[in-house]
Image (spheres, rainbow, N blue to C red):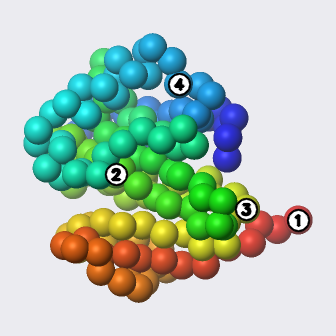
Amino acid sequence: MQGQAWAARLETEMSKSVTISVVAPEQRDRDFYADLGPFFMDGAVRRELPYLKDLPTKTWLLAKDAAGQVVGFAGIIPHRNGVTELCSLYVAPAHRSKGLAEELVARRLSMVDGARVIRVVCPPTSAGLYADKGMRQVAKRGSYVVLERKAEKKAA
């Protein structure tokens, strides 16, 4: 997962191009924090993602519009116990209901490598994004649900 450098094009319903890029922990730089930093300070974003944080092992996916503005993001955190956590999924309101969240979920799932379990903690309203990917609710954490599935083994 780390060091992967790829980007993909996603055409939204409005025919605006969105680029999704992967930023591994060692690739974070001044530009990355300039792009993502404002979301950490935005009250509306913090209400949706109260646990938004940047951890040293977290890989980020950034979705940018044609003008280079971040319109969504998501994170992946591999834990030493073999669990990989999908976290920090956010899509700006103007870009919702266009398939971007689904694309971010699919991209993160395709990047999971070496995990035994994939886990996500999300609001119940987002659980459907993961349920159709084979994840099942295993617990509740406050007003959030915890979904998990066993990681798929990659063919040798």
Q: Earlier in the sequence, mark 1 or mark 3?
A: 3
- The residue positioned 41% from the left and 85% from the top of the image is 138
Among the 4 quarters of the image, the one containing residue 11: top left
Q: Mark 3 belongs to which amino acid?
A: Gly
Residue 49 in the image: x percent, y percent? 24, 51
Residue that mark 4 sits on: 28
Q: Residue furthest top?
A: 30
Q: Nearer the viewer, residue 4 or 20?
A: 4
Q: Is residue 156 above or below residue 149?
A: above
* x then y, percent, for residue 19: 44, 32
Mark pair 2, 1: CA separation: 30 Å
Label 1, residues with CA under 10 Å away: few <14, some 14-19, many ≥20:
few
Q: Secondary structure at mark 2?
A: strand
Can you tell which of label 1 and label 4 is closer to the viewer?
4
Identify residue for label 1.
156
Contact, mark 1 vs mark 3 (Cβ under 8 Å): no
**Real-space Cα distance between discs 2 and 3?**
22 Å
Label 1: which secondary element: loop
How far apart marks 2 and 4 lie (CA) works out to 18 Å
**Amino acid type at image mark 1:** Ala
